[in-house]
Image (cartoon, grey):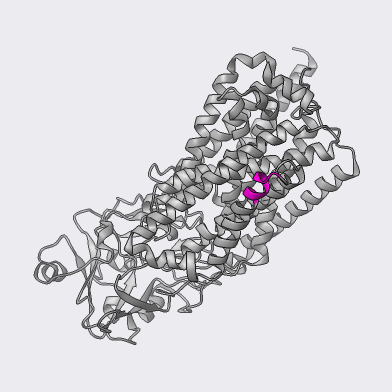
Amino acid sequence: MYIVNRELEGNSKGYWALLGGLGALILLGLFAAYNMEHHGHVITGMNNQIVWGLPHVFAVFLIVAASGALNVASVAGVFGKKAYKPLAPLSALLAIALLIGGLAVLMLDLGRADRAIITAWKVNPKSVFSWNVVLYSGFLGFAAAYLWTMMDKTVKPLYPYAAYGAFVWRLILTTGTGLIFGFLVARQAYGTGLLALMFIIYSLLYGTAVYVLVLMTAYLGGQRPLGADVMRRLKNMLLIFIAASFYATLVYHLTNLYYAKEWEFERFILLDGGLYTVLFWVGQVIIGYAIPFVLMALPGTRDNRNMIALSSVLIVLGALAQMYVTIIGGQAFPLELFPGFTEKSSFFDGEIHAYTPSHWEWMLGIGGMAISFAMVAFAVKILRILPESLADEVADPHAKK
Amino acid sequence: MNQFEQYRRRFIGGALAAAGAALVPGVMLIEVAHSRAPEEGVSSKHRWGLLIDTTKCATGCNECVTACNTENGLSGKTGLQDSQWIRKVELTNNKTGATHSLPMMCQHCEHPPCVDVCPTGASFKRADGIVLVDRHICIGCRYCMMACPYKARSLVHEDLNDTQLAHMPRGKGCVESCTLCMHKVDRGDGTTACAEACPEKAIVFGDLNDPGCEIAQRLATYASKEVRADLGLNTGVRYTGI
């Protein structure tokens, strides 16, 4: 049987409720951005110690997940696994949507969001942020070209170029995202190129989990058949990516534990950092890795697609916990200016920095997520992104050709 | 040419004229806003810096901080979101219990991490070594605050309500830090507000490149220290006695 892609009908009450709900969240996000712009960052919980807060947790998650979401398409386009080919258009679309959502949050959080465009012509070749302006726009270009070559048969000869280009670009992109932190020389939590590799590995897990959730929602809502074979493949990918993410996390902390100068920081994250310790162990490790791994590996639950969906939700929650620990935990631990001395000052030297996100930050972050999902919901209704059926008899024989 | 074509051409012409009229003021403003290039007027012959003698700096004394706030129009408030360009750091040796007090501010590095990471070039270093933020092109991304090893920078979190001084423009949503009193340096005062205010003369301002200068002579005579020397940033602010 041939795979036929068709627009989602999208006339159900559920569809309009989804779009309406997302629209409302976007408006709330924009309202928050307006207020942050009008009053200044004084209305947020961010301060001169925790300079990047909850909006960055959401933004970096979305940007990292964006490059990972493209993975499903790369498995088809670069690694030649035909079974993934029908899944590829949604993969490229989701990558674009997630990146735009993340970038929106990042831009709207700027102290002077009105000046964001300056980054387009004032380029600092040494700044990772400056590289990212090129990397983000390049990624959007490659992913869009990739989507185009998948959907328009007349440009089929360009398909492999777009596929390889997007794949290589996404690796460079996530390297750039990791190095935002990796190239921060002075802070105990950062200053290691390992962060670039960690972010690439995390991106595979986060992007695939979001992909699974979007795919299942679309097929459930659109009342289209989604076979066990597709779900099994995606589940197996998630299992491998959980293991890889856990391994990357392990190497990062073991490296730090080997260096005496990092012990205090590791003690903070792993043992007595309060919220950060809880978010690391309970959020990132147990909710983000352990439970979904067990659910998707145990014979009793592994073939149950509700469990795969639940696992994907847990992975996303774990991802947000990881970003919170990496970004905010890394800043909460004080900079060490004078090793061997206890430091005290009116600028909070030597103490764990306080941070409580305000509702404005939640609104902006969630608004960014809503932008991404609204874009997907809209695009699958107007473009031929989703195969009419991904039932086993359609999707599976396709793989064996 | 038929009538429609004529109409079409007139319409396009009109639209172009309107777009031009809308753009001209903007282009003109760019000309007006074009500020002095960082190299103009200052020279790399100088390398301005500070030498701080921590043996003279008294615990509890805050004169340098107060003077800086007054000189630059800062509120002096010390909440989590308030700007602090200079702060007194009290140190206690973990083994011996010995205490030291010293002022900490932008260290005016030769290789400043804040300048490296800035996406727009708003963070920049003048030819004479003073590290500044160009408030016209700072987008408030705070990457420099993440990168600074000395926590020397602050974001302006709220409206300044006309508290700015003519010689020290600031801006809500922009990052700021110690300017080494560049307005004083540029008019030839030969000192900074903090150095002037210190009752113990613990802060010496001068030209690190001028062997005849007190600061250069002291640095040549006594052992001094850069904070986080391991980072290899070659700071313009040096400390003795610690």
| Residue B134 percent location from the top left of the image | 42, 56
> In the rendered structure, does residue B48 fall within the stretch colored magenta?
no
Q: Is residue B59 visible?
A: yes
Span shown in magenta: A292-299
Residue B136 higher or lower than A379, as above or below: below
Residue visible at 14% across and 62% down?
B210
Please determine whether, in this image, residue A46 is positioned above or below residue A62: below
Residue B102 position, x and y percent, is 29, 78
Please state the total of marks drawn on the protein image: 0
**Residue A293 lies in the magenta-colored region:** yes
For image coordinates 33% across by 68% down, the residue present is A337
Quarter of the image with the N terminus of chain A is top right
Quick one: B42 or A382, which is closer to the camera? Answer: A382
Relative to A106, does residue A8 appear above or below in the rendering? above
| Residue A117 appears in the rendering | no
x 52%, y 26%: residue: A165
Taking A277 as reference, is B165 left or right? left
Coordinates of residue A41 in the picture (x, y in percent): 58, 65
Q: Which of A385/A206 is in front?
A: A206
Left or right of residue A274, residue B194 in this image: left
Q: Would you say the magenta stretch is mainly helix, strand or loop?
A: helix
The answer to which quarter of the image holds residue B146 is bottom left
List the single residue furthest toward the front: A299
- Indicate the position of residue A56 as horizontal and vertical percent values: 57, 55
Q: Nearer the viewer, residue B112 or B230?
A: B230
Say above or below: B146 vs B32.
Answer: below
Of residues A167 and B2, the one nearer the viewer is A167
Q: Is residue A182 left or right of residue A212?
A: left
